[in-house]
Image (cartoon, rainbow, N blue to C red):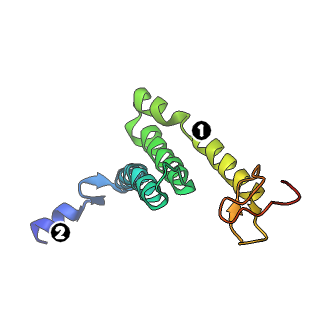
Amino acid sequence: MDSFTHWLWSDGKICGLTVYVFIGTCIGWLGNAIFSTRFLAQWYVTEKRKQVTMPALFWWLSLSGSLMMLFYAICLDKHWVFIFAYAFTWVPYSRNLIIHYRHKKAEQVCAGCGERCGPRANYCPQCGTGLAGRG
């Protein structure tokens, strides 16, 4: 067996780590990558809309990345500072997703142009048509 193959898999270990530790480490790295890419989603949507926007994808990346990091912190790192850093982040991320989807559900569709309008809008910002008996 050559040295690379021996380093990669030997004695029931992957890269010198037990399978459990290797998989946990991969989850930790994946969580870190997912959490770190959330700013790219926010930046892309902000540039596209030409206004500062937090898309639902931002909150999904935040939630999934932080839960993976919490898993890593609890199962492998076992350091209280790291565990505490991710223990409660899911609360605002989940709440923001709930608010986002409630707002989407309450949006009105303009009969004049089909544009989606805010739930409290009286007139369509695109064409000026009155909305749902308002205005």
Which amino acid does the dot numbered 1 rest on? Pro
- Looking at the picture, tell me which residue is in the foreground, 38 or 31: 38
Which amino acid does the dot numbered 2 rest on? Thr
Residue at 67% x, 59% y: name it. 125
Rendering coords of residue 80 (x, y %): 43, 27
Foreground disc of the pair 2, 1: 1
Spot the residue most to the top.
81
Rendering coords of residue 21 (x, y %): 36, 50
Residue at 69% x, 63% y: name it. 116
Spatial CA span between label 2 and label 1: 45 Å
Residue 131 as seen in the image, left or right of residue 45: right
Task: Give residue 30's quadrant in the image.
Answer: bottom left
Residue at 80% x, 60% y: name it. 130
Circle 2: is it few (<14), some (14-19), or many (20+) Cα within 10 Å?
Answer: few
Q: Which mark is residue 5?
A: 2
Residue linked to disc 1: 92
- Looking at the picture, tell me which residue is in the foreground, 110 or 94: 110
Rendering coords of residue 20 (x, y %): 40, 53
Residue 17 as seen in the image, left or right of residue 63: left
